[in-house]
Image: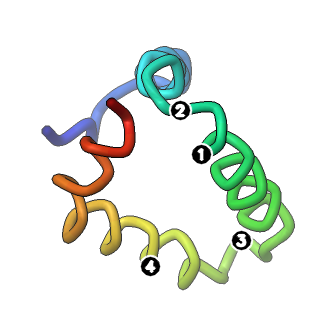
Amino acid sequence: MLYLSMTKAQIQTEIQKLLDTVPENVLQDVLNFLKELKDQPDNNFNLANNLRKILAEDRELLEKLAK
């Protein structure tokens, strides 16, 4: 699923839907990741690109974790 033309509000809604399905123990890791990402300079996208790669490669595992 590609969400290239979504508004910020739409993206936040989709993220919230996904977070509602994630086990509580995973939420802390997600929170920590987002805090790290927030502290990165705008021109440093390595962390975000790595996450995107992990999500794409390990989608099945992440779906199992969410159950």
Mark in front: 1 vs 4: 1
The residue that appears at 79% across and 67% down in the rendered structure is: 36
Q: Do the residues labelled 2 and 4 touch (CB within 8 Å)?
A: no
Q: What residue type is labelled 4?
A: Asn
Q: Which amino acid does label 1 sit on?
A: Val
Q: State the SS at label 2.
A: loop
Q: Which amino acid does label 2 sit on?
A: Pro
The disc at residue 35 is: none
| Mark 1 / mark 3, whichever is N-terminal | 1
Residue topped by disc 1 = 26
Above or below residue 24? Residue 50 is below
Which quadrant of the figure has residue 9? top right
Q: Can the viewer see residue 10?
A: no
| Mark 3 / mark 2, whichever is N-terminal | 2
- x and y percentages locating residue 59 in the rendered image: 21, 55
Between 5 and 52, which is closer to the camera in this rendering?
Answer: 52
Disc 2 residue crowd, few under 14, some 14–19, many 20+, Cα 10 Å = few
Which quadrant of the figure has residue 67? top left
Above or below residue 52? Residue 24 is above
The residue that appears at 79% across and 59% down in the rendered structure is: 38
The residue that appears at 65% across and 42% down in the rendered structure is: 25
The disc at residue 23 is: 2
Residue topped by disc 3 = 42
Mark in front: 2 vs 4: 2
Q: State the SS at label 3.
A: loop
Q: Do the residues labelled 3 and 4 touch (CB within 8 Å)?
A: no
The disc at residue 50 is: 4
Mark in front: 3 vs 2: 2
| Mark 2 / mark 4, whichever is N-terminal | 2
Q: Which amino acid does label 3 sit on?
A: Asp
